[in-house]
Amino acid sequence: MLYQGQSIRVEAVDSGIFRLVFDNQNESINKLDQATLGELREAVTRLGQQSELNGLICTSAKDCFIVGADIREFNQMFAQSEERIASALLDMNQIFNALEDLPCPTVTAINGIALGGGFELCLSTDYRVMAESAKIGLPETKLGIYPGWGGSIRLPRLIGVDNANEWICGGVEKRAPAALAEGAVDAVVPVDQVEAAALDLVRRCNAGDFDYRMRREEKTSPIKLSQMEMLMAFESAKGVVAAKAGPHYPAPMAALKTMQKHATLPRDKALEVEGKGVAKLAKSPVTHALVGLFVKDQMVKKITGKYSKQAAPVHQAAVLGAGIMGGGVAYQSASKGVPILMKDIAEPALELGLAEASKLLQGQLKRKRIDSVKMAQTLNRITPTLSYGDFERVDLVVEAVVEHPQIKKSVLAEAEKHLKEGAVLTSNTSTISISELAKALQQPENFCGMHFFNPVHRMPLVEVIRGEHTSEATVARTVGYAKAMGKTPIVVNDCPGFFVNRILFPYFYGFSALLRDGADFRRVDKVMEGFGWPMGPAYLLDVVGIDTAHHASQVMAAGYPDRMTQQGEDIMARMFRLQRFGQKSGAGFYGYETDARGKPKKLADDSIDELLQGVVGEAREFSDEEIIQRMMIPLCIETVRCLEEGIVSSAAEADMALIMGAGFPPYLGGPLHYLDQLGLKAFCEMAQQFSALGPLYQPTEKMQAMAAKHETYLGLALNASAQGNSQGN
């Protein structure tokens, strides 16, 4: 053994060939934290001191290769000055450079995920052998930065400028076929042959079959393009990159400009340019927000992991109601390997549910995400049924029938009779009280909410709603099933609207009040989309369904009469009365027609202004700033209310839920991060300007007290992470 550390060991293979193995003894995965980088520095130094060094293969003893850098440590480094960040990056790069400069052929055996810094390490070796099941990429732009360990330098020299622009600016992750076709890896083999293939490649280099020195020279030299070719490659990409990134995410364009700037430089000079650029981005509020989201995501995983560890697994699921939602739930469960019964009372409904699942699988097949065999296997995991005959073997049921309390109570009570002892019963209700629905059940402790967001296959969030009598075992099993479905579950307590919808409706009421005061809904949509929302409020209501929103608004008004009762006919009530339900009816705030791909296409509808007379006030011009403030203030205050009332357990969960479930702009980091960035004192003063609009615009007493003490919700989130989720322990 040449070297043995906590994360790395170096051992001889034969004839001067060594194996450097990443195997973090304290984690289930490998990551490049400071301790591991220190060991890598020592390991490479010892390798360089060998009198006989004929080759090196880098491998992993874990199922993954290296998932990336330790983002928490990066976050701490980003708190330093630009100069210190750039200096730290250059120091880290000396380790990768030393690996790249070893006097022997080097090959990485990529057996699993190699992302970010993990893939940058792969790029520092001469060759890469990749498992068929592995995935590689440089996703740093999703964190508001770009690769800072030589990735922006080595990749374009290896695979060409155009391909590298897509990889780096888009933050994409590539599977083996694409990685091989584009030249990022040199061979693709079954996972059990990766190390043997890497060793064979080292030996063939020593035999003279491959010129590893020439490959290394290509990666460390300026890009071999003429000045005109270079100009065309980078300038033609700028419009595409800018359009995809949008105005709120500077990292993709910064990455492109940096690659253009160092394209004519050798490796060491190029690294200086790369480091300074990353250091500048690291100080931006967008990076602070996006890195913060990553950290919060880890917190949420830690919280849900506590539930999963104590949960009995779901081997067989069932969904009641085979419409679009039921079909989506069935597809998601089956596609992740959990068999599911799909029950309805009518054959046509079952056909609709199966058609929905089949359509989603056809889309996967068309995009080559699955093959026909996998599609057939997935469909075979969905069993349509008109009876409860097989329900005695079901571990968890998702009720997804019409949003009506009496109908749901009846269906849930009937289903409960056919379940085995300990089976979990859940409701996919979006507004109806879980504690109220539980009154129809004999064993309310086995019942909770499991609120999916539409479309099920795309929306990552699932709200797991704890009712008054719900047991922790029920919550744990539901969380475990949601995770098995590939979703991010967040546990919330029961209240009207639960968490996400409760937050969204003050936002919609802010929209309604703007229209009442004379704003044009099209302008409000444009401003809020420009602010970073995927849809403006009018368009979002059309997509949700005006009938659905109108029903939910009545639930909210009954639950929070002090601030969510609307006086007279508001915009939602008018649209509901006109039966302009949005996309589902072909007309809402906008008109809709089906495009060539079968999807609804939004169109202008000139008739709407006359139809809204009486609920839209006399036309008045609002500034962008006022529109944003009037929309965002009630949303942020209601988020705080939920946190204070314990509806959601931590600031981290609150921010992640609104990002994943409502489309809150990620560059703002979530509503509580947004409040921190504005400053609670400044926010409270801003809200005071609109106090005449009613209680929705009045900060809570605790908010005002925190503002006076200069406290932040980030501080609360970190405290919650340190203490754990008390309700989940």
Image (spheres, grey):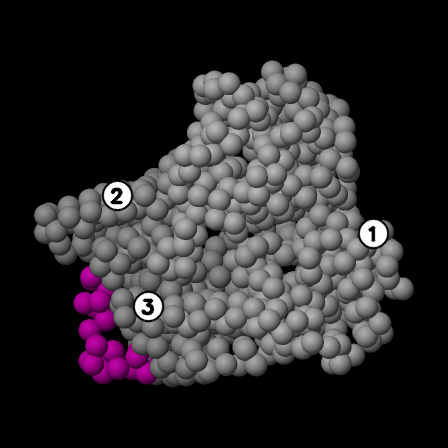
**Mark 3 or mark 1, which has the lower sequence index?**
3
In this rendering, would 467 be left or right of 298?
Answer: right
Taking depth in this image into account, of 43 and 557 the one nearest to the observer is: 557
Question: In the image, is residue 211 part of the stretch drawn in magenta?
Answer: yes
The spot of residue 662 in percent (x, y) is: 57, 45
Residue corresponding to mark 3: 179
> Front-most of 417 and 586?
586
Identify the residue at image location x=55%, y=45%: 581
Identify the image quadrant of residue 339.
bottom right
Q: CA distance from mark 2 to mark 1?
A: 53 Å
Q: Nearer the viewer, mark 2 or mark 1?
A: 1
The answer to whether the residues at label 3 and label 2 have Cβ atoms under 8 Å apart is no
The residue under the point 45% across, 24% down is 624
Residue positioned 56% across, 68% down in the render = 352
Indicate left or right for 469 with 90 as reference: right
Magenta part, dominant SS: helix
- Compare marks 3 and 2 and give the one earlier in the sequence: 3
Report crowding for label 1: few under 14, some 14 to 19, many 20 or more residues within 10 A (C-alpha).
Answer: many
Residue to which mark 2 is pinned? 239
**On the image, numbered disc 1 is attached to which residue?**
435
